[in-house]
Amino acid sequence: MIQERHAMLLNQTFPTGAEDWLCPICGRRFIMTWPPNYRKIVLVGGDEFVIHAGGKGSLEIGVSVNLEPSEIGLTAEDQERLAPYEEWVEKNLGDDDQEGD
């Protein structure tokens, strides 16, 4: 089954750096700030049963993005604290194509 996808559009960037994203198809709308102070506030839920993705430049939201810890401002202490969660995610939500796991 192929899940429906909607493209999010960057509607506005505020002086604080926060961004207003909008789905022109279903009206989903949220305000987002990027790391190191990541935050997403959903203003309008829209159709929550479709995949929403979008981007600006070479960065896209709604898809997997691999960033090095230094690129998002994580300290060595942050990385140490997050290690157990990363291990759990890799073990439980890692590649679906791995056989025998």
Image: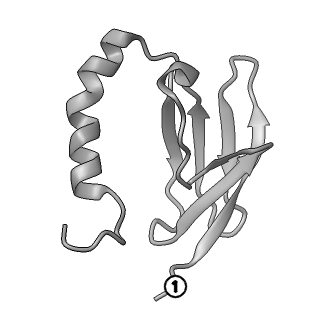
Q: Residue at x 54, y 63 (%)?
A: 46
The residue depicted at 21 percent of the width and 44 percent of the height is: 88
User: Residue drawn at (54%, 23%), measured in percent from left and top?
Assistant: 72
Q: Is residue 45 above or below residue 25?
A: above
Identify which amino acid the numbered label 1 is placed on.
Ile
In this rendering, would 66 be left or right of 92?
A: right
SS under mark 1: loop
Taking depth in this image into account, of 39 and 71 the one nearest to the observer is: 71
In this rendering, would 75 be left or right of 18?
left
* Quadrant into which the C terminus falls: bottom left
From the top left corner, tell me how far across and down residue 69 is, in percent: 47, 24
Question: Please, is residue 16 above or below residue 85 in the view?
Answer: above
Q: 32 or 97, which is in the foreground?
A: 97
Which residue carries the number 1 mark?
2
Instruction: Please provide percent x and percent y for residue 15.
Output: 76, 18
Disc 1: CA contacts within 10 A as few (<14), some (14-19) or many (>=20): few
Q: Residue at x 20, y 32 (%)?
A: 84
Residue toward you, 41 or 8: 8
Compared with residue 51, is residue 71 higher up or lower down, i.e. above or below?
A: above
Residue 17 screen position, x and y as percent: 69, 22
Number of numbered discs present? 1
Can you give x and y, in whole percent of width and height, for residue 87 in the image?
24, 40
Asked if 88 appears above or below 72 in the picture, the reply is below
The colour scheme of the drawn protein is one colour
> Horizontal placement of 51 versus 98: left or right?
right
